[in-house]
Image (spheres, rainbow, N blue to C red):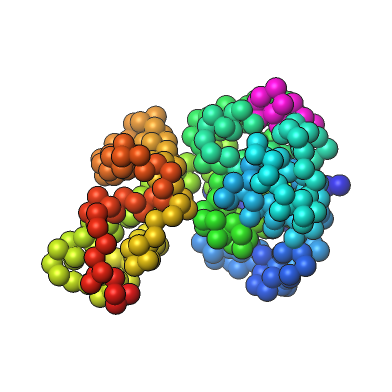
Amino acid sequence: MRPTAVPESLVRAGRRRALRPAAGRDPRLGIREGSAGVTQKPDAAVAWLPRGEWGLLRVAFVGLGLMGRGMAANLIRAGHQLTVYNRTPERANALAALGARVASTAAEAARGAEVVGMCVTDDQAVEEVALGSEGVLSGSAPGQLIVDHSTISPEHTRRLAARAVEAGAEWVDAPVTGGDRGAAEGTLTIMVGGSEAALEHLGPYLTAIGRKVVHVGPSGQGQLVKLINNLIGAIALAGAAEGLWLGRLGGVSLGTMIEVLGAGSANSVSLQLLADRLARDDFQPGFSLSNRLKDLDLALQSARALRAALPVASEVAELFRERLARGEGQEDQTVLVRRYFETKDSSATERC
């Protein structure tokens, strides 16, 4: 079954067009109800998608880590027929309880699917899942859309897209931002690199897992925008750590600094995240330091390919590398702050 296409006017590359479901989540389907309409401002064009406008899909999803399992659960709630695969089979149990079929290989999961979603760690993992002897492409069929939500290099993405074409499939890079909470709640922002035709057919899939979908250009550009997003986030996190430490040395409490900085131009997601972790003295893993450094290194690799110097990002990457050398790679990225706050200051956190 081929779903009804997204109106072509909403997905033209080169314009900042976004697709997102309307407010008011239907608890049965996990999609949003609302009346159809599009705002006309070129920087804020939004499609409000009524429930039932598009058909449901046969979907496979590979990679059920911190992000993937939430995304997969929302595909089931949206009514899609889902088959899942993960190298650690136990991670599929909760999805099986929701109605997913569990495959024993990525190839088995891909067979018969109209759309195959993937969310794994890095270039090597994506290549193994896609091109291995039991990989997705060995189970794909002509016309299948393979949607990669992993964060990998744009260059590698374009090579994989070419291999998909050879197999008769089409590769779409669609990395996400919004964290594991956004994945669980279906509120991710999705950056899509690929053809307009592919995006048209992916409407029901993408709006089940995300709140905002933006077509940023051809293959690889979704990954480039994601790396830029993570580069800026890493720099903001390092800046917040240094600023809060400076305030501490000057005798200002963390609570006071956050009250002021959070209301001014210094406010950011990174600042709020770091303040929360410090206040709770909690650095339990979320987005790991090793993954943050991996994304920074990929951004710097892309910069070198484009002959661009990124001195600030390069310095921040070394700060993360310093913590990695201390064996903190699997801890949350906010452990960067330990470079400054090696011990908890109760007087700095008591007013948070």
**Does residue 34 lie above or below 134 as drawn?**
below
**Does residue 346 lie above or below 148 as drawn?**
below
Q: Identify which residue is drawn at 69% across, 51% down.
A: 72
Pinpoint residue 292: horizontal percent, then vertical percent.
Answer: 41, 44
Pinpoint residue 115: horizontal percent, then vertical percent.
Answer: 74, 43
Pinpoint residue 217: horizontal percent, then vertical percent.
Answer: 55, 43
Q: Residue furthest left?
A: 250
Q: Quadrant of the C terminus?
A: bottom left
Q: Identify which residue is drawn at 43% across, 43% down.
A: 330
The quadrant holding residue 7 is bottom right
Left or right, 56 with respect to 202, comes to right
Give, as a single range, the part of the protein colored magenta: 130-142
Task: Tell me if I can see residue 2 in this picture.
Answer: yes
Q: Identify which residue is drawn at 69% across, 40% down.
A: 89
**Does residue 140 lie above or below 187 as drawn?**
above
> Magenta stretch containing residue 150, yes or no?
no
The quadrant holding residue 316 is top left
In this rendered view, identify the residue nearer to me: 98 or 205.
98
